[in-house]
Image (cartoon, coloured by chain):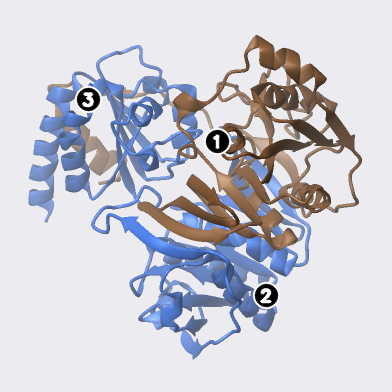
Chain colours: A brown, B blue
Amino acid sequence: MKILVCISHVPDTTSKINFTDGDTKFDTNGVQYVINPNDEFGLTRAMWFKEKQGASVDVVNVGGSETEPTLRKALAIGADSAIRVNTPATDGYAVAKQLAKVVNDGGYDLVIAGRESIDYNGTMVPGMLAAMIGANFVTNCISLEVDGTSAKAVREIDGGKETVSTSLPLVIGGQKGLVEESDLRIPNMRGIMMARKKPLTVVEPIDATTETNAVSFEKPAPKGAVKLVDADNIDELVNLLHNEAKVI
Amino acid sequence: MSILVYTESENGKFKKAALEVVSYAKAVADQMGTSVTAVAVNADNAETLGNYGASKVLLVKDESLKAFNAKKYAAIVENAAKNEGSKVVVVSASADSKYLAPLLAVGLDAGYVSNVVAAPSNVSPFTVKHSAFTNKAFANTEITTDVKIVGLSNNSFGLVESGGSASVEDFSPSIPESGVTVESVDKATDKVSIADAEIVVSGGRGLKGPENWGMIEELAEVLGAATACSKPVSDLGWRPHGEHVGQTGKPVASNLYIAIGISGAIQHLAGINSSKVKVVINTDPEAPFFKAADYGVVGDAFEVVPKLIEKLKAFKAANA
């Protein structure tokens, strides 16, 4: 089985978010970048397939050279090779088009992407990619088994979960549950040394127009101070929620 | 040329989010000088969408579509959009709509923006405000394609009743085979889901163990709320993944979020930033959550929550 894991290069979850240039650009100053957490669950599941069932695992990112440390980390975790499509990740549609070219060229059976990236939260790239390449698609995936060309997946739905059967070629929008948090791997020294020797191929992008354009950003309005209610006066809390906040 | 809305229903009944997207679409239609057409699948009382601003409903009745299927449903909406010549399609932010929308976007060659929180600031160029960085910020984004898809964040626009009526037309588009078959659905039908909930009651590690969740569930029941939890709680296996709220879990956009025994890590706060009113109950007055909350109680959850349940029961009885 030939697996491709899509890796988004995103600000660490603890990052404070700021903007520059008149609130038109994300301020990267002091921001640590990581593998998008939803992608990391998928990468670890791909490693499981590689080790238990036999599979090759490539990782791909659409982005500038600044994303290479993130791809190297994925190689250190155990991916066999990495591909970087040399263009900034502008919008979801353009990213999906670049990924579709990589998937078609590489002949992958299974593509695992995070259900969304934690920066733009677009929830669109895996679905668009599946539609573009004509593959089956399951998102919010919390369990995945593959047997030959058949696949069984469990996906989270609002208020529960559903089990689906499908077949390869398949695109997965994965998330926590695909593997447990405790199963996520931290690159060890051997992995880091080996990653240096693994191929990281840079491919030039195809022409892909963007369909959306983020023109400005804003932060939520600053909050007023919390109104503290005495633990012995819960009537007051009920009163505030009813009369002031009007939420009950 | 009308604005098209995909309206979700369950067991024939429209979800609240469906009424909200119709209300939103009506506002967009008024801005663009056009009308609203809704697409519904196996819904009863489709004409009721008129009360929220739809003038026409395209109704698909097909038993084989009982279980949601993203590819088939996307094809229905795509057909409807093409029939109507719609330049704007509105969907909700439910798990199903977020599954369907990217497939629809490719089918219609349309730009798609999800997690939209307000009516367009401008319709030419078409510009919408949406949450980004897991609710730590908002982006104002132009959609530059001829056809545009807007995914509306739940509880962000509200319901607007207009008292109108909608004509209902049977709609039978050709539906493709789907390569994904639903084998089984495991859903607690009597529970409010986090995505639909107007109120969410959430517990953290301060509750000390899963055996103490009874009072969280009781509080949620009194309020008609959904239950949720912090990341450590789902990592420890005290509660299912589906209840984990935060940057790597579910985002919450409820009207009221009550956090009990949750200190308020930055990743958790990001997940609940879109909630309108936040209440925190925690023994530690230094917990970061107090800086993000509207109302706070410094106290032991095991004493405060039973009191709150008792007071809310009395309040409900008095206001029944």
Which residue bears the numbered disc 2? B86
Task: Provide residue B210's location: percent of width, then percent of height.
Answer: 22, 30
Which residue bears the numbered disc 1? A52
Task: Provide residue A139's location: percent of width, then percent of height.
Answer: 54, 52
Task: Provide residue B195's location: percent of width, then percent of height.
Answer: 40, 50
In the rendered view, does A61 fall on the left or right side of B288?
Answer: right
Looking at the image, is B125 positioned above or below residue A44?
A: below
Tell which circle, 2 or 3, labels the residue nearer the N-terminal end.
2
Give the foreground label among 1 and 3: 1
Which residue bears the numbered disc 3? B209
Q: Quadrant of residue A6?
A: top right
Q: Chain of mark 1?
A: A
**Amino acid type shown at disc 3:** Gly
Distance Cα–Cα, label 1 vs label 2: 49 Å
In the rendered view, does A247 fall on the left or right side of A60?
Answer: left
The answer to whether residue B27 of the structure is visible from this angle is no
Disc 3 on helix, strand or loop? loop
Pick the front one: A56 or B245: A56
Distance Cα–Cα, label 1 vs label 3: 35 Å
**Amino acid type shown at disc 2:** Ser
